[in-house]
Image (tube, rainbow, N blue to C red):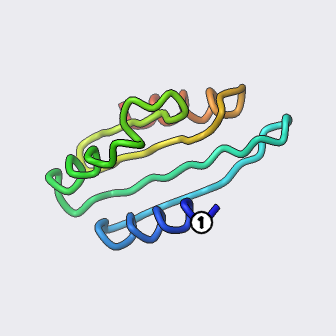
Amino acid sequence: MLTTVVLAIQLAVVSSAAFSAIYEQSSGELIVVYASRFASIEKALESRSHSRWVDNPKVIRVENGTIVAMVHGEGGPCFNAVGAHLRSVLK
């Protein structure tokens, strides 16, 4: 959970708006959602440099301009539904 708090603080520092939420699947596993609207497209693109979030099967990352959103979890119906929702909203 400390990683969640640290990332949320980092997003708030470099962005003009940030959001985080934690959901619990029926299995008890947690799904963490982060979203940030960066001040510039350059800052949004810089966020890709955090390698643990890129090409990670436990992360769904969606980008649209200055907005970056990520869902982190172990898979499952809630993880997939939140990821699908973000993809539809941020396309």
Q: Percent from the top left, x then y, of residue 44? A: 24, 51
User: Hey, which residue is sitting farthest left in the picture?
Assistant: 42
Of the 4 image quadrants, the one containing the N terminus is bottom right
Q: Nearer the viewer, residue 26 or 90?
A: 26
Residue 38 lies, with reference to residue 53, above or below; the image says below
Which of the 4 image quadrants contains residue 61? Answer: top left
In the rendered image, which quarter is residue 38 located in?
A: bottom left
Mark 1 secondary-structure assignment = helix
Query: Is 28 on the left-hand or right-hand side of 45?
Result: right
> At 85% across and 36% down in the image, what residue appears?
26
* Quarter of the image where the C terminus is located: top left
Which residue is at 76% across, 41% downward?
29
Q: Is residue 61 above or below residue 1?
A: above
State the residue position of label 1: 2
For this view, does 62 lie left or right of residue 44?
right
**Residue 80 screen position, x and y as percent:** 62, 27
Percent x, y of residue 8: 48, 65
Name above or below for residue 2 compared with residue 22. Answer: below
Locate residue 72, reporting x and y percent.
Answer: 56, 41
Total labels drawn: 1
Q: Residue at x 38, y 29 (%)?
A: 55
Tell me what residue is drawn at x 47 percent, y 43 percent: 70
Quick one: 69 or 55, which is closer to the camera?
A: 55
Amino acid type shown at disc 1 = Leu
Decide which of 25, 74 is in the foreground and name it.
Answer: 74
